[in-house]
Amino acid sequence: MTEDAPGTPSRPGSQWYDLEAGPLVRPYAVTGGRTQAGPPGARFDLIALVALDRTAPETDEDDSLGPEHLTLVELCRAETLSVAELAAGTGLPVGVVRVLLGDLLERGRVIVRRPVPPAHLPDERILREVIEGLRAL
């Protein structure tokens, strides 16, 4: 028997198990080797907000959804979360979460609200004038 580290015997399959984390699954196994998220043109910025589509039928028995998909659905069921928060809540890399969200978006399970581009935000000067006008009252 070989040893991985001093005093730690190496067993077949031991590279897929971590004593603290439990069984390890590689990200490419979770996504089926895919790296692109969902339908063409789908973008999941870190601050994009993801909510469960309340009009979608409850189909948690869908065999095509993996446990990671269902975990994302459960997190979104409680509240609207950003992509970054979903990645933190699942413990998965952001790239994997984006691919899984793309699957859920294609199935109509989630709604994604993209952040407002800076060009569409009100000018800071206008906001300051409004504040000064309110203070004058």
Image: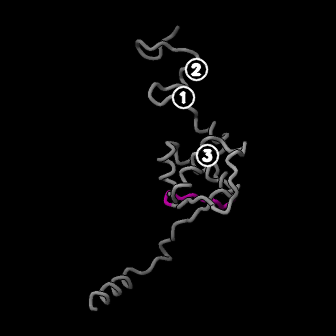
**Residue 13, numbered label:** 2
- For the point 57% across and 49% down, the residue is 72
- Which of 89/94 is in front? 89
Q: Are marks 2 and 1 in contact (CB under 8 Å)?
A: no
**Residue 70, numbered label:** 3
Residue 129 % position (x, y) = 34, 87
Please say whether residue 44 is one of the residues in the magenta stretch: yes
Residue 41 % position (x, y) = 66, 61
Q: Are marks 1 and 3 in contact (CB under 8 Å)?
A: no
- For the point 56% across and 47% down, the residue is 95
Q: Main secondary structure of the magenta part?
A: loop
Residue 111 % position (x, y) = 61, 62
Q: Secondary structure at mark 1?
A: strand
**Where does label 1 land, which residue?**
23
Badge 2, how many Cα within 10 Å: few under 14, some, many 20+?
Answer: few
- Look at label 1 and name its amino acid: Pro
Please say whether residue 40 is one of the residues in the magenta stretch: yes
